[in-house]
Amino acid sequence: MPKTAVKPVTEQAIVQPLHSPAQLHFRTLRLDTPFQPRIDAAMKTNDWYDWGGYRAPASLWDEELEYFAIRSQAALFDISPMTKYRIEGPDAESFLNRLTLRDVTKLKTGRVHYTAWCDDEGFVLDDGTLFRLAPNRFRLCCQERHLPWLLDSAIGFDVTVTEETEVVAALALQGPTSFAILREAGFEGVERLKVFDLAEFAHEDGSVTISRTGFTGDLGYELFVETRLALSLWDRLWQAGELRGIRAIGYTALNRARLEAGLIVANADFVTAEHAIRADRVRMPDEIGLGFMVDLEKGHFNGRRAIAEARAKGRLRHVLVGLEIEGNIPAEHAIVYHRKKKEVGLVSAAIWSPMAKRNIALASLERPYGDSITDDLWVEIYAMRELKYERLMKRAKVVQRPFIKLDRRTASPPAEF
Amino acid sequence: MKTWDAIVIGAGHNGLVNACYLQRAGLDVLVVEKNDWIGGAATSRSLTPGFLYSNCSYVCSLFRPEIMRDLELPRFGLQVISYEGGAVFTRDGDYLANYRDHHAHRREFARFSARDAEAYDRYARDVTRQCRFIQPLLMRTAPDPTSFRPRDIGELIYLGKKFAGLGAAEMADTLRFWTMSISDFLDEHFETDVIKANFALSGIIGTALGPMSPGTAYVLLHHYMGEVDGSVGAWGYARGGMGAVTKALADSFRASGGTIRASAEVEQVLVKNGKARGLVLAGGEEIFGKLVVSNADVKRTFLKLVEEKELPDTFLRRVKNFKMRGSSGKVNIALDSMPEFPALPKDSPCYRGDMHFTDSVERMERGYDDWKAGRWSADPFLDMMMPTMLDPTMAPPGKHFMSCFVQYCPPKVEGRDWTDADRDAFAETVISQIANYSPGFRDRIVHMEVRTPRELEAEVGLTEGNIFQGELTFDQLLFNRPVPGYAQYRSPIDGLYICGSSTHPGGGVMGAPGRNAANEILRDLSQPTKHMSPAHDVI
Amino acid sequence: MTSFDAIVIGGGHNGLTAAATLAKSGRKVLVLEAASEIGGAARTEEFAPGFRAAPAHLLNRLHPEVVKTLELERHGLALGPIAPSVALSRDDKPLTLHGAYGESLSGASASEAAAWQELRAQLLRYAGILKPLLARRPPELGNMSLMETSAFAMTGLSLRRLGKEDMRDFLRMLLMNVSDVADEHLDDDRLKGLLAFDATLGSHLGPRSPTSLLGLYYRLAGEFGRQPGAQALPAGGMGAVVAAILRAAKAAGVSIRADAPVARILAEKGRAAGVALDSGEEIRARTVVSAINPHSTFLDLVGTREIDTGFVRRIKNIRMKGDAAKLHLALDRPPEFSGVDAAGHRGRLVIAPSSDHVERAFNPAKYGEFSPEPVMEITLPSLSDPTLAPDGACVLSAVVQYAPYALKEGWEAGKPKFLAAIMARLELYAPGIGRLVRHAELLTPADLEARYRMPGGHWHHGELQADQMMMSRPAFGAAGYDTPVEGLFLCGAGSHPGGGVSGVPGLNAARRIIEMRG
């Protein structure tokens, strides 16, 4: 290439205008949650993952021990990145009743239920928790983003739907001492919360919504607060929990607990309908163990016609089951066979359960396997050991979920520990 | 007198791909090229000291990775780098950026609409589904639906099965998608004008249609079918400019024993007793070959290089009716320093991608109205980029090569031929469009090359300057491309084949027509095609 | 409380056809019409003292099966003579298509006439292939029955009969634009302008829009008096056609109530159970059939609570913003179009000087502006039926494009300007016509919407474009006349095959109901 004289750099003719922080978001590809200063302080492993565009901890100090914090003391987990929508208006109840599978008229103010919603073909768009904060005000929490679907579902209803993920901070406090910590922190009346109850409590000059819910199958609570009060809430819990073993945890530990509780995760244990590219990957509620939610008596709801027809015509093709697998090697993403030969499904999540002392898994099987044929099922585990797959064919038994059932989860009033 | 096994007319990317595959099958192949440089429309040219221009095609995304592998193009220097971002400048001084990071992409859309931010996933899913449906067809010869040959029927059944494999709702969406306008399709997904404009541009690039014309949703797909190292839909720069693609092809061809003759313009294809025998060059030299493959467009091939009497009337009528109205121009600019776009933060990755100034679908469509009236767009759509932001080989340090693809630009100006004054006025329209967003832009220009359809036809040989060698409308796709009955790379003349973008699957630096044609030729010769690796799986 | 087997909402020609067909099958049927007069957009109304006209003014696709099933001839349907089409020209030399869509031409050169005959034959041949598809229920995606598959195969076979090269041209041309097709065959701007106009009439397309040729095929798949492509001004106006259908319906035992606007379709657990009127009265029926626009049917009458979100989306996505305005002029005496003979004046007069002109007229419509130089089709119905106007006076009826439903400046401000633009065009072809105007009624799409309860003022009840045809008409989930709401059926122009006075949607819907035992 010929050499050319390089002109001296002149003063920039144009002064760069000030760009708004909103425009400059590209400089921070992973957001901090309102609790980030505390999480950063607790972070020792520097083991982060991407949760919906947030920098979230996979583990903080020891994923093994973090799990035991859930089961033995109390674990604090930042759930702020969870997608949240505020649904408000005179028609909020009927809107949600048409949107979701369960009967929302039965959800009283101050209660929470676990629900799911489907597209026209009856395929699950997502599952999530619905909080009834007031007669005409709800909060819907879920994994994926659904604003266009929610807005289009609101046509013809007097209701507003607002995405509030970034403006509401949220924490999960889970474990045997979680109740004691809340009481210690001064949340008076928290002992009255039964499982799936919620109530508002004073915090600083504002309030915090506490629900007795969680994703661990243990005694536990979830707390929602406006972002400006996030850190003081964390500190209040932390201080109260100091003598009761409060620990901050990351997702890996939580994931073990949720699997023991037999809970499913969207886009891990099933593919949500709006993301599925391949026509056969979508699932109806009955195919992922959510058939119990479907209320055909409550009037019309989205997907009703398709679900009723699939049931009537026996068109349900899959079933999601809990498996107990012999041995102790987790069977994650293993293929499930019938009689060791015929491929009948796939394990979506698996661990050795420290609480159940069993090798457990969630699997999606093709009916009738897992449904009417449950014997002679096998999983083929490829366990990578020092650069070699150890291939194991292990017997699997379909079992009821949850894999562990803890009385303390539902005890009312909750036990101290 | 030597008789070549095959002679390929035109050293464009498809001609070279075709020649490479034939040569590697053991044939003795000659490529003749009219220009003293090779590459056709995929070329890098130094027109001012220190700068290299990708002076026609400017983006490498559609080029099939199977071909790169088969022909060992990385070994011969081909390297493709993905865009880092992209932007549409808005008239109010803001911009809409495209980021590779999924969440950044969503947050950017959220600046304009909370709904649109969350609508992107479904849009991406819908387009991906359509892409997956069409992508496997790229590397296959289109079946002839009027034929009863087992092979055609087998291919039709393959297509039918693919369609039947979709769910009923998806089938309905697919049927609609194929005939929709990109504007209507986007209206069903998004509410913000600039976001729609951001996607609509892929529905019009290279076509003589506006975003509101039915069929442009398919054109979008045509632009999305590319991939850069497995990242489907990604667009990228070829290091060293688009000439790097054809240079690698030429080197690969020569390395396998092929011969290229530049500055050899073909006057006529020699036909004897209905069979192609070779060529006559301008000047009268005759070259003999057992078969002739034309990389020239279908009109140039059959209306200029072959005598009318050799062709059946129906075929000739259809070739004459083939539509290849040029719709775009190109302005290549050498800049002595980095231009400023005050709207865009200095560290924005958008500088390392494609930039646009058309912030509404209506502006795009109005640009098309100008074209229909035989004028270049007064408010043109530009696909502008500076490959030198990522590629140090195309300009001296601190200086930049800027490529501006311009739409719309008619093949004739209000019915008459282009003049130099028209060309300059056209360039001025483009420069002032950029200067509106980049103060001081004119002062940075050290050299400029302006290419209207006139130049594209005269230099590259694209009839009417159509960059796809034929419009991408339904009547010219699949088994209709280029003409019904001859969509399988053959022609009415025995031994004369076509391998350019006029054939299925069409334009863009894709290479698929060249490869598919080679496959058909080798099939006719009963030669093995083991050196052609199978098309990538779509699973 | 009275109860019916079936309630038909909307007393236009399709609603009446469906009702009559259902009644003939032994069902007890009630037709509810919101207006005080039956007939929908085919009813003839007085627009100035002594002057009457209907929005629909030409008969070119009334389906023979409808005529036969309803025995319309017995019920007084009188078919007039085939009307010519005249492509008007500024130089007083119009071009006339005689007989069924130009069996012969006058005013064209011999070579152009020959080229036209070849193209006409080709277009009619290809329209003939599509014809059976336009006559029957569209196949169900993913669930094609043996009958449907074989019907499709039959079409395939008729394709085969074309011969290989013809078949190839058919496949190539199917989705082409009309402008390119015309350019490939013809030279005469008047003729090309006429084809361009006919292909795009009633749609939001210009002649250069891909797929616009389908509009012409749609027209040529229609027939009149067994002659494909033929058209006529019905004796007694379009109202007489509706009157015959109405008589057939009444004879079959259909009950008819006018002034009975429906407020809601009653749905119980996903099943239609009847209707509630604006008055609050509820009428129950096992089957509800809607002849009105699908958008109104689902979003207004059924309501989003009873249907799914994806379906609501599909219904909302139906494009149905009309571009055609309707002009009615009350004239002191018949106008004289330059160079047009008496027979021509009794036919269809078209102002569309060239295909490019039609395209230019379309351009502004894309941006919510009306055509400054509109294109139009004109009839003088009172010449064939003197009862439509006072003695010696004349009615001029014209469909004018492009007049976008959502005019940016609003129709209140835009209407006088658009009327002036139309009159300026008319004056060019019929000098002095302006002085004859006693009264002018211009119905913009917004007016048509208000008067005939047609959303968007669109007479097809939704754009008739490739992506809204067949299995996609009006939308996936309701393309076969039955709908996601059990017991609710569609039978209007919004359903396959589309608008125009054909009666096919009504007939097909009724057959579907009978087949499903609804």
Image (spheres, rainbow, N blue to C red):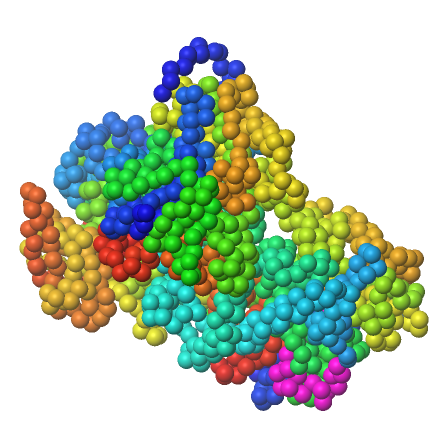
From what the image shows, is residue C33 above or below residue B239?
Answer: below
Nearer to me, A147 or B283: B283
Residue at the image point whose x is 47% and y is 75% from the top: C160
Q: Is residue A396 visible to the viewer in this orientation of the structure? A: yes
Residue C216: % across, % down: 63, 66
Q: Main secondary structure of the magenta part?
A: loop
Find residue B50 and report its image quarter.
top left
Residue at the image point whose x is 24% and y is 36% from the top: B75
From what the image shows, is residue B12 above or below residue A316?
Answer: above
Residue B223: % across, % down: 43, 46
Nearer to me, C315 or A405: C315
Q: Is residue C9 visible to the viewer in this orientation of the structure? A: no
Verify whether residue C77 appears in magenta. yes
Nearer to me, C399 or B535: B535
**As drawn, is C510 to the left or to the right of B254?**
right
Residue B509: % across, % down: 40, 43
Residue at the image point whose x is 72% and y is 45% from the top: C409
> Total of numbered circles in the picture?
0
Instruction: Name the outermost residue toward the front.
Output: B1
- Write down the region rendered in magenta: C54-79
Residue C84: % across, % down: 76, 71
Verify whether residue A246 appears in magenta. no
Residue at the image point whose x is 40% and y is 59% from the top: B275
Nearer to me, B392 or B435: B392
Q: Quadrant of the C terminus of chain B?
A: bottom left
**As drawn, is A383 to the left or to the right of C501?**
left
**As drawn, is A405 to the left or to the right of A226?**
left
